[in-house]
Amino acid sequence: MKRRVVITGMGWITPLGHDLESVWQRLLKAESGVASTTIFDARTFPTQFSAEVKDFDLRKYLGQRYEEHKTASRNAGFALAAAEIAWRAAGLNGGAQVNPEMVGVYLGGGEGPIDFENFVAAAVAGWNPEKKDLDSVKWAEVAYQRMNAVREFEQDPNCAAGHIAYRFNAQGPSFNTLTACAASTQAIGEATCMIRRGDADVMISGGAHSMIHPLGVTGFNRLTALSTRNDSCITASRPFDATRDGFVLGEGAGILILEELETAKRRGAKPLAEIVGYGSTADAFRVTDIHETARGASAAMRAALADAGVEITEVDYISAHGTGTEENDKLETLAIRTVFGDFAKNVPVSSIKSMMGHLVAAAGAVELITCVLAIRDGVLPPTSNFANPDPNCDLDYVPNAARKKPVRAALSNSFGFGGQNDTLVIRGCNGH
Amino acid sequence: MNGRRVVITGLGPVTPIGVGAAAFWNALLEGASGIRRVRAFDPARFESQMCGEIDGVEVGAYVPKSYRKAAKIMARDIVLAMAGAYEAVKDAGLKTKCIVERGEASGPPNADPTRVGANIGAGLICADLPELASALYSASDNGDFSLARWGTEGMSNLTPLWLLKFLPNMLACHVTIVHDCQGPSNTITCGEASSHLAIGEAFRTIARGVADVCICGGAESKDNAMALLRQSLGNRLSRRNDQPERACRPFGADRDGTVVSEGGGLVILEELEHAKARGARIYAELVGFGASNDACSPAQPSKPHPDGRGTLLAARKALRDAAIDVGQVDMIGAFAAGTVEHDRSEAAAIRALLGDRTAQVPAMAIKGGLGNNGAGSGAIDFTAAVLAIQNGTIPVAVNSNPVDPVCGLKLITDKPVDARIDHALSIGYALGGGQNAALVLRRYQQ
């Protein structure tokens, strides 16, 4: 018999707050988490704003166990806090309810922020302008003095998963994927497959990322991927709007407790939604561009729907990748049209990136959480900042105001640089 | 699941002792070492000054002519993956887009591109230090860096596509583009466990029916100042700088750390009937996968669990998955990092697994001549295990003599030994982060 996978707990740390319900209410009110960047002085950068997590204190979530995790990088801290919230919400904090060897971790976790100040000090000291080359002896002198083993180790992308495994004694399968902006959707999809197959009963899954540091913003600014609407940052993230000019960089974490249905029932946990479909494809086209037919994105959606056994007419909501870049929004629209055909105009599509910014590796997890909440409450989060229709983006984007609508099944897309496409399909749990 | 069996039909190791299956295997049999004093930069100020370096691997030899310009946006890790993918695909006799465009085969592909996946392990790819240092310097006055100047002028000295050189998923991205693999694609970033986890997940992907072929494994280069520094700060490295070839001594009594290296490998996993239908050579069958976490304190990143708890659990899960008894294991492909504590931890796990057969079951340990290739390590170990099964030979554990009696494993220290290996267990783990994985290989039988 097929093992079914349900979500029994959720937590997030986001630019709109840290509490599940209050952030959800802010999203429904189309509030924005975007403001001038404070993590570093970005006043001379092409993009001077971002969606930062505010007032975050890991101690608040870990209590006495904080000491053991106090070295956690910013993103690992977000991941730990979100996992703590999700674990408690799932009712797992009582202990001894599940076999630790059958509890795994599958994150789409980003690399930890670089130790910028010390990295720069070594780089500048080591550069020899006459020879136009790095003097690795001088570099190493400064680097050995200033860099720190733990700070360096915390940048490893598998570090957050290590923290979580330790905190929750999760000795089961432990993975981290870093498929750029698709990572946490992919993590949740693969974690689902592991539970289905019997490799684990519970998976702590989702993602965490923070690229709001000088080199992160530099990287995206050089790619001209970010909005530069510095005079109006709250309206800068404009998915599917004709005047969109790039995404707004955010940070945060989203963690979900995935659980085999019978295991959840046995311990009296309430399933919030069921993960029924997952699809993953590669564009295999170009490093920088999406294939002009959106073949990879449509194939991922089709694969997820086929895996789910869900008809397109049952999909009442699509959480779009919807970054607010010219190319993504146009081609994601095309992909949805390709898969849903004439029915596409009947399916509401929205992008919470319009309010939350783009949480990069963590985006998919946070967006899946909103899909669960949309199903639970029968209400769709809007695409805010939508004012100017784009002829290439001609779907129903739930513009600017939340909408009441019963949701039977929801589909969530995440696409990464390099042609990485992942889609999840979830269903409500009524009647289980 | 669904009775779909998964076999290995192609190997593409890219290592400091040889590139390609034949060269790599011959070098292993000779007990070759690829470790030397670092040449990529002046290592004089580093505590450990050695590295496994690979000469002569340039991306042009592994991609179609039209793709050569993309080399400008490839970190070394990506180049190594491109080489490994090409070698593996050629070895498997797959007619991918790359092979056809290079004029090495013609006609339609012999695997449906939408059914070919990729799952490639990658490390934390270091930015090209000279490139970045040059740009950062341009925003400094008398050695003082100005973030304001970086914003106005410094950053524009970086190429627009700068970020894309270092994203871990760019290994899989370039590989899937060149070989036209449109199926499921993933990038596992779990340190040294990455390749094993990637191969294990690719195994599951094929078994559950969403792909027929998967290019999987991993690659990483630690042959740069930043990577060497990070490993050095973690106290993982040998300081035997006067004898690089003898420095890394896995399970050796006088081991003092591992050595950084560059390399990796990709392997072709294929559903059995698909392989048979195209008349592919079958190296071995992959029959089991297990993964775990030590769940150890992350505050001490270089300290493994003293009893190898996670490694043992992954191994037991893999054997259960393969539905074989531990008594059927004929060889352990150990990770064998060469650090004092990790080797002790891994050996404890192997002893606990094998029980009173510990002294009889040979453990293959190949890092003495290879060093630690990070996310690429596991793919090299896995490839060696496949070749050991196929050739019925276990290569020597270079530098491991005298063997640490505390570890208590059966190592091959004299010359390669002939052995019929029906089942081999290949182990991988991350030096930090707690991730473990194990894979069970079976000698192929119809």
Image (cartoon, coloured by chain):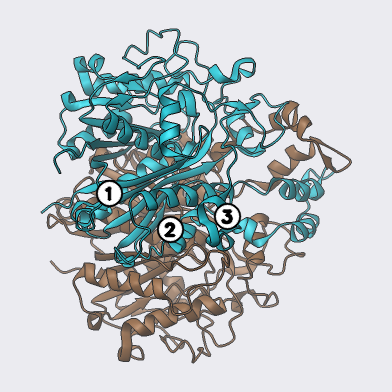
From the image, tell me which residue sits under label 1. A192
Q: Which mark is residue A362?
A: none
Q: Nearer the viewer, residue A349 or B372?
A: A349
Give above or below for B129 relative to A384: below
Q: Nearer the viewer, residue A264 or B386?
A: A264
- For discs 2 and 3, the disc positioned in front in the rendered view: 3
Q: Earlier in the sequence, mark 3 or mark 1?
A: 3
From the image, tell me which residue sits under label 3. A72
Instruction: Write down the quadrant of residue B323 in the picture.
Output: bottom left
Element type at marker 2? helix
Q: Check disc 1 and give the amino acid type.
A: Thr
Label 3: chain? Answer: A
Instruction: Write down the quadrant of residue A23 in the picture.
Output: top left
Q: Residue at x 39, y 14 (%)?
A: A399
Give above or below for B379 relative to B127: below
Image chain in cyan:
A
Q: Check disc 2 and give the amino acid type.
A: Ser
